Amino acid sequence: MHQLRAVCFDLDDTLFDHRGAARTGVRRFLGDLGVDVDEAVLAEWFRAEDEQYERWRTGEIDFAEQRRERLRIVLPPLGVALPADEAGLDALFDDYLAAYRDAWCVFPDVAPLLRSLRERGYRVGLLTNGSEAQQLDKLARTGLDEAFDAVCVSERIGVQKPDPRAFTILAARLGVDPAACLFVGDDPERDVAGARRAGMRAVLVDRADPAAADLSTVVGTTLRVD
């Protein structure tokens, strides 16, 4: 077994609190449209987000269209009239993005862990699906833009998790063998299974479960037994 030389991470809901920021953003966005936002409304928003994001991920629609589709699905049943054209839908979605961005943050255990890993000599990498502009903006706005030795965004590298090629590209940019990498993410298939198919070790972190082990514990336990 290779000794671990690199620790690599997913971004959304592993390091970056996407779901928390999105909940805050949706409440403000829909509240400004006169909608009473309860848990059922939030669940429908996230269902549409997951479905349409997957359609983009598989190449069925482009990134802008998956955003428009989310509005088409969620807003009319709430009594909100949609703009007649794509430009209007894009402008409306920008209102959500502004509220979402205002709530952007990383989980509080992230910065100390990343700093500690680099101080201990590990290479640190990031692999994230999504739009390069948005994902890099998240890093810049949350102070993580200098925290990694390599950052791979699916839109830029041309392949997405869970495709093993995405993980091997990250390992190559870190200058290490995939077998010497630990990958940490919140999705059992896209993160853990994908990384393992590429030859990496991988562990799951569950930010939604208060009883689950925290990120530092998950990473630290794996590194101690290496």
Image (tube, rainbow, N blue to C red):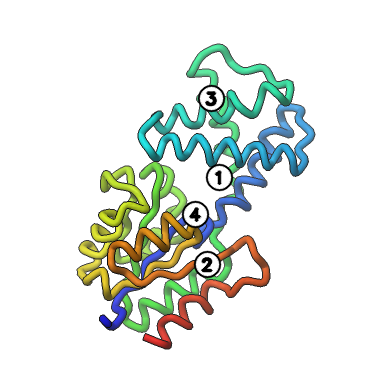
Pointer 4 local density, CA inside 10 Å: few below 14, some 14–19, many at least 20: some
Q: Are marks 4 and 2 in contact (CB under 8 Å)?
A: no
- Mark with earlier residue (3, 1): 3
Instruction: Give the distance between the C-alpha atoms of the residues marked 2 and 3, in whole angstroms.
Output: 35 Å
Q: Is residue 98 above or below residue 138?
A: above
Dots 3, 1 in contact, CB < 8 A: no
Residue 205 numbered tag: 2
Tell me residue 138's x, y (percent). Answer: 46, 51
For the point 42% across and 75% down, the residue is 115
Amino acid at the residue labelled 3: Ala
Q: Which of 203 and 169 is in front in this view?
A: 203
Give SS at disc 1.
helix
Cα separation, mark 2 vs mark 1, equals 24 Å
Amino acid type of the residue that numbered disc 4 sits on in the rendered structure: Asp
Residue corresponding to mark 4 = 12
- Residue annotated with mark 3: 91
Q: Which of marks 3 and 4 is in front?
A: 4
The image shows residue 29, relative to residue 225, as above or below, that is above
Q: Position of residue 36 (x, y in %)?
A: 79, 34
**Mark 2 residue type:** Val
Q: Is mark 3 on a helix, strand or loop?
A: helix
User: Residue 5: where, in percent of width, then height?
Assistant: 29, 78
Residue bearing the label numbered 1:
101
Q: Quarter holding the N terminus?
A: bottom left
Asked if disc 1 and disc 4 are in contact, CB closer than 8 Å, the reply is: no
Q: Please rate how many residues cluster around mark 3, counting C-alpha atoms within 10 Å: few if below 14, some from 14 to 19, many from 20.
A: few
Q: In this view, does 197 lie to the left or right of 193?
A: left
N-terminal of the two: label 1 or label 4? 4
Q: Is mark 2 on a helix, strand or loop?
A: loop
Q: In this view, does 208 lie above or below 215?
A: above
Closest to the observer: 136 or 74?
74
SS at mark 4 in the image = loop
